[in-house]
Image (tube, rainbow, N blue to C red):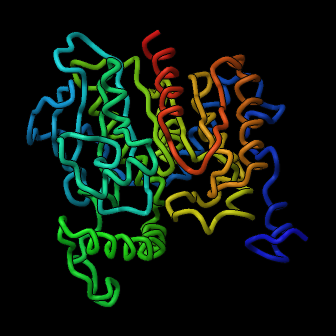
Amino acid sequence: MTPNMLGAYGDWAAHAVADPPRLSFRQPMFTNVDSWRPVARARYREALLGPGGAATPVPVIQHHIEFDGLSIEHMQWQLPYGPPTEALVLKPAGATGKLPGVVALHDHGGNKYFGLRKITKISKDPHPLMVKHQEHYYGGAAWANELAKRGYVVLVHDTFAFGSRRMRLADLPGNIRNNLVEANPEDEAEIQRYNQFAGGHEHLIAKSLFCAGMTWPGVFVFDDRRALDYLASRPDVDATRLGCGGLSGGGLRTVMLTGADERIRCSCCVGMMTTWRDYLLNKCYTHTWMVYIPGLSRDLDYPEVLGLGAPNPVLVLNNRQDQLFTMPEMQRADRILTAVYKKAGAADRYRASFHDGPHKFDLEMQKEAFAWFDKWLKG
């Protein structure tokens, strides 16, 4: 027996899920991607169990600035639940006409105090923790800014439990928050204490959402689809040329949003591609509670959620030394998506690349991602 998260029960649990799953496009009963996708997507949306009350957000503009060659709108909108969502819209200064739009999805990174600020820069003096974050994961770049400069309208928003949408300590019972108080935004040590608390609070959030008949990915998809609603509604955006992408937690949200919404015409998932088997047996301890959708694995493997976008183009960027996954299962996910796209008659619209290094979205990977968006959203 190979050591795994369930010990002697591991093989039993792994064999409970067929390969291919029931609604996999790899099943011989599915011969046409256009007839398969609505069936599989309906099951996926059902399993998400997201909140209701969908409506295009009405933003309130807080500031309009020009920085780094970009026109930047800083805004808020109110969803049916929780605190207001902070968002940024970035595009080249002086741009005219309709541009392709991209929802840039921020990462998890063990840092819930911040959200959109992890992948943007709107001043010469960003928060020191965000400087360190971008140096560690992004080669020192604010990748949403860099993509916008290439001729895109890029929307970046805080999602559930991050940044402006984070859990406020004053709203939680004292014994749950270990009597912590809200962090001073200038005090790095206090922010780190909040993030340590927030990491330990995840299982309580997930349990509570299950009790409400919802899942964490379902809430993410609701938040992200509302952001997409707004982006598509803008007069400076070509709603037929919309994409999304992100690293890690942003890669997870890329998978989930692409699977849920047919308006996404091009996707780039970075550092978040493997199989349910990898989560089950090998690596659940490296992952957040935000990943899991109970029951879905019987119908679709994790990469097949991203494959629901077929034949729209999908790029997957992996790191060979990524500590969050095992190489054999990253490679198996690649084979699954290759088979899906080949059967869909769109083999040229799927690509996976394996880069050296740990969990990251560095400048080389950004170059590949931006060229992918250029090819399919601007070409």
**As drawn, 137 above or below 175:** above
Q: Residue at x 85, y 67 (%)?
A: 11
State which quadrant residue 75 falls in. Answer: top left
Q: Nearer the viewer, residue 178 or 13?
A: 178
Residue reaching furthest to the bottom: 175
The residue closer to the viewer here, 312 or 195, is: 195
What residue is rendered at 41% in x and 75% in y?
A: 201
Q: Residue furthest right?
A: 1
Side of 47 relative to 193 (left or right): right
- Residue positioned 28% across, 73% down in the render: 189
Q: Quadrant of residue 3?
A: bottom right
Residue 13 in percent (x, y) is at: 79, 67
Report the number of numbered marks: 0
Residue 206 picture location, percent across and down: 47, 69
Left or right? Give the position of 286 relative to 9: left
| x then y, percent, for residue 8 | 85, 77
Residue 306 vertical position relative to residue 193 in the rendered view, above or below: above
Relative to the observer, which residue lies in front, 238 or 200? 200
Quarter of the picture containing the N terminus is bottom right
Viewer-closest of 27 and 367: 367
> Is residue 160 rendered to the left or right of residue 75?
right
- Residue 109 sits above or below residue 312 on the image: below
Q: Quadrant of residue 295?
A: bottom right
Q: Position of residue 42 (x, y in %)?
A: 56, 40
